[in-house]
Amino acid sequence: MSSPASTPSRRGGKRGRGSNPPTPQDARSPPSQKRRADDSTSTGDLQPMPTSPPADVQSPGAPDALFSSPPQFRHSAIPLDFDISSPLTYGTPSSRVEGTPRSGVRGTPVRQRPDLGSVRKARQVDLHSDGVAEDITTEQSLGQKLVIWGTDVNVASCKEKFQRFLQRFIDPVAKEDEDIGLDLNEPRYMQRLEEINMVGEPFLNVNCDHLRSFDENLYRQLICYPQEVIPTFDMAANEIFFDRYPDSILEHQIQVRPYNALKTRNMRNLNPEDIDQLITISGMVIRSSQLIPEMQEAFFKCQVCAFTARVEIDRGRIAEPSVCKNCNTMHSMALIHNRSMFSDKQMIKLQESPEDMPAGQTPHTVALFAHNDLVDKVQPGDRVNVTGIYRAVPIRMNPRVSNVRSVYKTHIDVIHYRKTDSKRLHGVDEEMERKMFTEERVQLLRELSKKPDIYERLCSALAPSIYEHEDIKKGILLQLFGGSRKDFTHTGRGNFRAEINILLCGDPGTSKSQLLQYVYNLVPRGQYTSGGGSSAVGLTAYVMKDPETRQLVLQTGALVLSDNGICCIDEFDKMNESTRSVLHEVMEQQTLSIAKAGIICQLNARTSILAAANPIESQWNPKKTTIENIQLPHTLLSRFDLIFLMLDPRDEAYDRRLARHLVSLYYHSEEKMEEEYMDMAVLRDYIAYARSYINPRLSEEASQALIEAYVDMRKIGSGRGMVSAYPRQLESLIRLAEAHAKVRFSEKVENVDVEEAKRLHREALKQSATDPRTGIVDISILTTGMSATARKRKEELAQALRRLIQSKGKTPALKYQQLFDDLRAQSETAITKEMFEEALRALADDDFLTVTGKTVRLL
Amino acid sequence: MPCVADWLNNPFSIVQGIFAQNVQNSDWEKKVTEYFKEKLKENNATNWVPSLNDVPVHYLKPNSLVKFRCMVQDMFDPEFYMGVYETVDPNTKARVLHFGKYRDVAECGPQQEIDLNSSQTVTSERQTFYCVPVPAESVLVLNPRFYAYISVSQARVSPSTSYTPSRHKRSYEEDEDMDLHPSKQKEQHMGNCHCSGGDIHGCVEPKRLETEASAGHHLISPNCSPPLDLNFPLPGEKGPACLVKVYESWDSFKVNDVLEVYGILSVDPVLSIVNNEEREGSALDPMECMDTAEEQRVHSPPASLVPRIHVILAQKLQHINPLLPACLNEEESKTFVSNFMSELSSVRAELLGFLTHALLGDSLAAEYLILHLISTVYARRDVLPLGKFAVNLSGCPRNSIFTEHIYRIIQQLVPASYRLQMTIENMNHSRFIPHKDYTANRLVSGVLQLASNTSLVVDETQLEQGQLDTTGVHNVTALGNLITWQKVDYDFNYHQMEFPCNINVLITSEGRSLLPSDCQVHLQPQIIPPNMEEYMTSLLTAVLPSVLNKFRIYLSLLRLLDYSISEEVTKAVEEDFVEMRKNDPESITADDLHKTLLVARFLSLSAGQTTLSRERWLRAKQLEALRKARLQQQKCVNGNEL
């Protein structure tokens, strides 16, 4: 309860609005007092109770003017004692009813809203005397000109409008993500109220965006005067609720929690004008304090005569009564802790999220105060959207020093939290992360997507400093867009992988690392690791002691962190075996199973992998297959959709273009660079937009084309008695085609997409799956690690060896070296030791012989 | 019309005057900055403003105009303050308007109190930067008398007989006697590592530090027991850290920018008192527990130790070399540049000779060293920094004082330089990467938080066998990233953030360095002096200070020149490349072309030419060929040895 301490008396000044009437304390407008006169007759039993605390303590004579105008109530024909829920008496602690049947508006205790702060010295002002323009258009003639002092809010009309909003609002552009189980054609918030009735959680979250589309003016009032308007909303919601469900029993009255205020999103944009307004900012929690019990009301008991007294907090202090009112003993009052009222409070530090930060600056932080049930809702590290009221408090005056520090302390009283990444670990979708795009930006992107050469354009915008390698860039581009996510959970197959994995291999110094760096810098959730420098633990997850809580926590590694992003792994070949094995699961199932230190779980790791590998012999050996060159297990290789070779082309025209390109790098001025940089931003937005808004599906003809393509691929191999394509290749093709459709912002995958997917796939195959001995594209190099011809040759050799041994007659044992020499002498092709050993092993597998040391025994 | 002393010593009276005249309209703020801008433009006015870099804080008058040359180390949250406030006399009800800009404390007379509810109050916003003196500034920049002398004489180069280092800064002599006793230094360094765990370069002279710090210490209240860490990037740095309050266009400043600020010095002891009061009160008042004690300590340190400067004018500096005019675009400085250009070639020849001697007679290495020293990142193409030229000087004798002397020579030539001794201990125990301390809410600095164009000399000859621990590996990786991408990933605990930098890295090593580099030059000493110490010292003393100054101007100036390549030469380069590839496709790659183009660029610039000529291109190729041949030869030698 920070704000009550500060707000009432000090706020006029810091509003920054020049037009504020003089300070609230002394100016008291007569009309409102008159109102009050007939108020007190109508409010019945509850009236004498103390109203908003600071108001009382400060000016005991005038708890008046805090009620809304009675004429309104007469109009709406609601029982008169309803006034308890008047917005301005709202938050009175003493209004809680102990025990008693709790139903209906009266029975349900009101709970304080420390988040709103105490109701300030709000009084209603008759506009006739004030002269402020008012644009309320209610038909009610009485009371409509009455506004809360200092604002243009008329409680009656505001309440009525909000009730109308609750009753009528139907979201025209409903999104599924938060409305699970809601009927989109019925008034949305009425269903919410029904939910409250059933669940019993008395909080009504209201999307400000909805309110804005419903009533612009009401929205503006909410943003500008949240402290006055929200209690009015509470009142309105409660009226409707208890009207509908009179028997409902709630813990306390419903509190309205607006969220998604559009005005401010970024911490950096906060300025003095936002003070006391409703704001929504996003950021990351970096620190949260312990729970602070804050005394709301102190309970004193006289030690002499047992007379009790309650004292409410005033600006963070309790005024201890020095004299007992009953027996007039001095200093006899003692505080009884057990009977005092406390509320929970927590201080939280929120730091600007890294995406919002301009380059080269350090992040800003802002303090948040969470109250009651919002305490402990967020943990350090959480990304949240916070809606709350921005406060500025002058640093406390010191009575002994006349000079005051001229700086204010600022904080936000939290009204609503919304975790932005809460769903990341649970699946569903990146719906929550939808980036906000301005209208113009969307327009620009849409226009771009209409260009016939958009694919080429984007491709050339990708890493312009890296020369040529068009197809590789195209592949990476498609990877950035990704396929459509499909869910087959209900048929038991689980998620299909939508991410495209790419492996680049080739000579050192062909700017592979640079490409990786570029991609890592481009995507919002990219991770960059290097094979040599990463362990299985670093990639997956590890358990560590949290510095904040000193508890064991699961820290996620690069693969989990790049969920929905791209994980760039450099020097893939240098990675050790155990680390690489982790990737098997990630690259196909897109999950990561962890069982360590008592934590067993499965994390999502829907990440695309962009890996780069150097050949074993440091230079690519064109006489060897891909597998032989990079020495990676084929099980892993087959999980890459595209495998590209980045070789240094030996070609004069290429050299010439390359030279020109490089030279231009060395004298182009800074401005031209800037232009390029702009492109990177556009590219980033383009990808983000396509990723979150475009979900292409296969059209009929496209699926036919895909089938044909697959059948063709199978056919190629079957002619030579080998399999040249597996279902995995078909899936790759589908993903590539979908990604290409996304590039065009098309909701349908068409023939062009399939064509490009086929072409790219073929290109990659041609590069990586060509059997160097025969020159034929052979997919089995990637799927089994050996080309069909090689396998055939191996078998032949084994047979030859068997014949040789058999020809030697019945010798139980043979000398190893002898046998090798014999075989070499017999064969017309060169036989290496490896080949010989392989043949021996093959025969051993057939239980024909065993090898022990230097002798070969027949069985 | 107020006289000079007025706007220097009592700038508030000026501001008050302007404020009083323009109470009604809000543009008094603009008028204030304009007034001071005008004043500072007047001839040499900037030299009369005392500099916080040279004069200890306690000699400066509070609330006077000062200047400060500094690097932005951290940025704190923006703060809201009372831009205009009203005081009221409780007896007479007389109301007076005041301005709160440029002040920490809202002042009012003894009989007045501040009306916090006044409708006249204007809330404004300002930004606080935590600034430290430019790390690793060399004696040339630090020496105040020298600085003043040079700038008064219109930065004209003249024999500087007045070049006597002042005592309270790290001076040449001091360095020298450090260097004379390397063993002593080592001891000290070990000691530092043990007690603080963070000191790398043992050039802290404990006594001196103590005397300097004690000036601030007796003012700190006793309950503030542990000494405040002023958060300098490099160990052993001295000088005042400052909280610089910026009032306009703070968005344009970035972390690690070098600024020169003119502003009002505020060392009001009230700031510290308010602080203590708050701390006492915090137990009672939940309002105050917003910040941890640690955070308060860091964000509002005692004003005597960390003074505040309320900025009136701030400008980013292109360079910190006092021998050069601050801004090269002005008319006067153009004549300066053209004058210097005329003697450029002779200066270059002399510098080459000097460096050749320093590198024991190896002219090729000297040539590359010049290229290295004038290199700077001039642009970034997506992730690729262009213009960085990290040189690995291999073949340095192990465990000898040679590398130390090389550093001393570089230190004499460039405005900011730092020698990083790459020992296992240093790598394991020091923090290279700045990281965010969330309890104190500040960016804790690391060795790699350096201003642009700082020369970082990494001494790998110090490396012994041993094991790097996690920190060590992180540090080496960070160093590698710095060299390759010219960026440092600052550690924000929950995420990392990339800060681009522009640091010239020179690695001295015995064999090939384990760190990446753009170009490796193998040293081939022509002369082996019997006494290295003597040889180097005499070399330095033999150079006239005036000549040394010319070298300094030369190196700083050439960095700032523009450069282009004509269409014609582009064609020629193209042809050349194609030809080279044809002859030897295995060994000539795009990377080689990159390197040769870089060498050509700096070669042209080092001769003062802003376009590439055919001759320079050939010369660059020739240099590269020589360098490669040497490496090849070295490989053979090593091969034979093995």
Image (cartoon, rainbow, N blue to C red):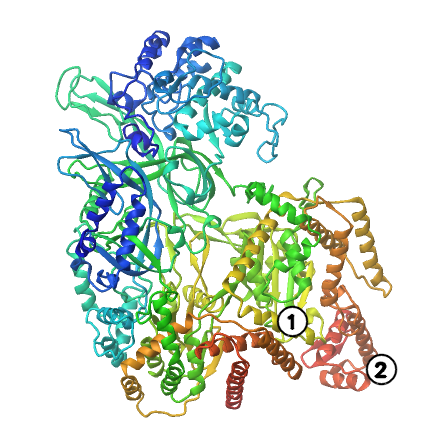
The picture quadrant where one finds residue B364 is: bottom left
Inspect the image, locate mark 2, and give the three-letter code of the amino acid beneath it.
Answer: Ser
Residue in the image at 73% along x and 59% along y: A761
Badge 1 density bin: few <14, some 14–19, many ≥20, Cα 10 Å: some
Foreground: disc 2 or disc 1: 1
Residues at discs 2 and 1 both on one chain: yes
Q: Earlier in the sequence, mark 2 or mark 1?
A: 1
Image quadrant of residue B286? top left
- Does the image show residue A648? no
Classify A576 as above or below A622: above
Q: Which residue is mark 1?
A: A657
Vertical arrangement, residue A247 with respect to residue B400, above or below? above
Dot 1 lies on which element? helix
- Camera-side residue of B153 and B207: B153
Identified at 68% across, 55% down, the residue is A455
Task: Assign a secondary structure to mark 2.
Answer: helix
Residue receiving disc 2? A807
Number of residues whose C-alpha sits closer than 10 Å to that of mark 2, classed few (under 14), some (14–19) or many (20 or more): few
The picture places residue A344, in percent across and down from the top left corner, at 36, 32
Residue B482 showing in the rendered view: yes
Residue B572: x percent and y percent?
A: 60, 79
Q: Considering the image in quadrants, where does the N terminus of chain A appear?
A: top left
Mark 2 to mark 1 CA distance (whole Å): 63 Å
Contact, CB < 8 Å: mark 2 with mark 1?
Answer: no
Kindly identify the amino acid type of the residue bearing the numbered disc 1: Arg
